[in-house]
Amino acid sequence: MAHISDLIATDIDSYLAAHEQKELLRFITCGSVDDGKSTLIGRMLFESHMLFDDQLAALEADSKKVGTQDGEIDFALLVDGLAAEREQGITIDVAYRFFSTDKRKYIVADTPGHEEYTRNMATGASTADVAIILVDASQGLLTQTRRHSFIVSMVGVKRVLLAVNKLDLVDYSQEIFDKIVADYQSFAEEALDLEEITAVPISALKGDNIVGPSENTPWYDDLSIMEYLEQVEVSASAQSRPFRMPVQWVNRPSSEFRGFCGLIGSGIISVGDKIRVAPSGKESTISRIVTYDGDLEFAGAGRSVTLTMADEIDISRGDVITKVDHPCLVADQFQAHILWMADEAMMTSRQYLFKSTSQSTALTLGVLKHRIDVNTLDKLPAKVLDMNEIGICNISLAKPVAFDAYGDDPTMGGFIIIDRMSNNTVGMGLIDFALRRADNIHWQAMDVSKESRSEQKSQAPKLIWFTGLSGSGKSSIANVLEKKLQAMGRHTISLDGDNVRHGLNRDLGFTSTDRVENIRRVGEVGKLMVDAGLVCIASFISPFAAERSMVRNLVEEDEFIEVFIDTPLEVCEQRDVKGLYAKARSGELTNFTGISSPFEAPESAEITIDTTEVSIEDAADMIIDYLAQSLA
């Protein structure tokens, strides 16, 4: 086995290269807070002398300072270092550790048990062959135990090692061990898609059943933790799956060379293989496989390469290169499992960004079919997902993407969800399948275009979007503006927040989710009006910046004009002709913008108007002056 003293001066690349011939096993340790993950990893490394970690090399130096024999790492010092290191990193990512035995090399994802960092655990599980689920024998199965197990199963891990820890606290009771194992198996049979569950009674602190049998559990005569990891079957190699290479970069240093660079996600490619590009469907033949160290005849999963083609075909970043005989699928609408990771709840109809491999596009969350209660396994009706909740949801993308179902290829079937405003990752998803309607619905080509409609009306179409608090003066200014534009001979249409709720949006309330859907629908109608060549005037509170941004992106850059009616809240309350603010203050009216629901003011509106300083007539004239050139 590799001892730490042999590895201190070795970097990770050369260390892994020395063990290239060994089989690699990836596993994750997970479970609830204080179930003993750091202690278990520390004990495995300590007992087997399998350690490779620069920070722990420093711990060996510390051990020398405190007089440990031959500089061997003290177990308590090792565990403290592991725990401290992980605590410092849990808000950033997963702590990955690399070690080796005579038979195998290992990568372990050391993940936090805190509920707020479930996202980190999901990241670590997504590449694992085995999950070690720790359970505190004195506590039994907890909500986080079930949640982590469900996520492990959801991302495709098929083998679970159930480590019932801290048996020393319950006098190494076989009865308690058997009860926990029975509870977990019952839960797993109903909720999890696993091929194998192996239960081991351990005390990570004392070292029982970590690398060998323990005298404290004479009633257990099966494998220890390390014995199990040494013999467990590794999942099928990524090289055994069909070839997939997402294109990350197009390299064209000269007119004589054009290569497509990327990391091979799965499969093997050889010179002379016929390929197909998704989503375009164009085909060619591999002429060269180029690497920094020279050309190759073939290359497999995990290798970064540059591929050149025999034909001059159009391939761009975000495309996926496959083999002709095993192409991937292409669609823009899916059913997916969603794990929500943000503090702010997931809202259906809100537009986010979808990112999978090198592909990215706008994503709209459709109907949430249900969320899954990880304790009862019930499928519960829900309109939103809160942080760390899991649900089944339809999603719609702005353009078709190449994909495989997650169960067939985790690389091609997994994606992350990004907030368009903050650029933060707010969720992860696993594609179950494409929706049938994605293949049946196509754009119908029309001979009459937006340009010809605009030319007929002798005007440039616009979407003038009024936003501001209730009572700020949006509708009043919009009304005067339209009359002035009509008098100028312009072709207009008005969409008003109250008016559309009598018809188009009569089924919507005023929750945050319904407000998002309200603006999504109105935005699509506004786009249709712009396509008709009209000047569309829309007056809506539209409190969320994300939805206003979504509407802006529906039309051309110069077609959207945001008008922020920046009237102070106290002035809006004084006007209160509908009595809405009074009802909101008394609690009769819930989810009222400015009182019990937030208003996210625009940061860079094209026009900002304070109606305490500008009259309605002057405000309309300000907008007309702004429009003068583009409407001419």
Image: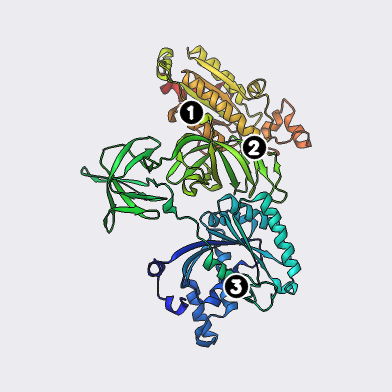
Who's the residue at 59% across and 37% down the image? 544
Residue flagged by tag 3: what amino acid is it?
A: Ile
* Along the line of sight, the residue nearer the viewer: 480 or 592: 592
Q: Quadrant of residue 587?
A: top right
Q: In the displayed structure, would residue 276 be above or below residue 483?
A: below
Q: Is residue 203 above or below residue 471?
A: below
Q: Secondary structure at mark 1?
A: strand
- Foreground of the two, 474 or 622: 474
Q: Residues within 10 Å of mark 3 (few under 14, many from 20)?
A: many
Instruction: Answer left or right for 362 relative to 390.
Output: left
* Disc 1 target residue: 560
Residue 204, percent from left and from top = 63, 72
Describe the element under mark 3 as helix, strand or loop. loop
Neighbour class for label 2 at 10 Å: few (<14), some, many (≥20)? some
Q: Point out the image quarter for the C terminus.
A: top left
Q: Earlier in the sequence, mark 2 or mark 1?
A: 2
Residue at numbered disc 3: 210
Residue 463 relative to residue 582: left or right: left
Residue type at mark 1 is Phe
Q: CA distance from mark 3 to mark 1?
A: 64 Å
Q: Quadrant of residue 223?
A: bottom right
Q: Please report whichever mark, 3 or 1, sits nearer to the chain's N-terminal start.
A: 3
**Residue 369: mark in rendering:** 2
Q: Position of residue 335 (x, y in %)?
A: 57, 38
Contact, CB < 8 Å: mark 3 with mark 2?
Answer: no
Location of residue 225 in the rendering, given as x and y in whole percent from the top left corner: 59, 69
Camera sees residue 618: no
Q: Residue at x 52, y 61 (%)?
A: 233
Q: Could you tell me if residue 246 is visible in this image?
A: yes
Distance of mark 2 from mark 1, alpha carbons? 34 Å
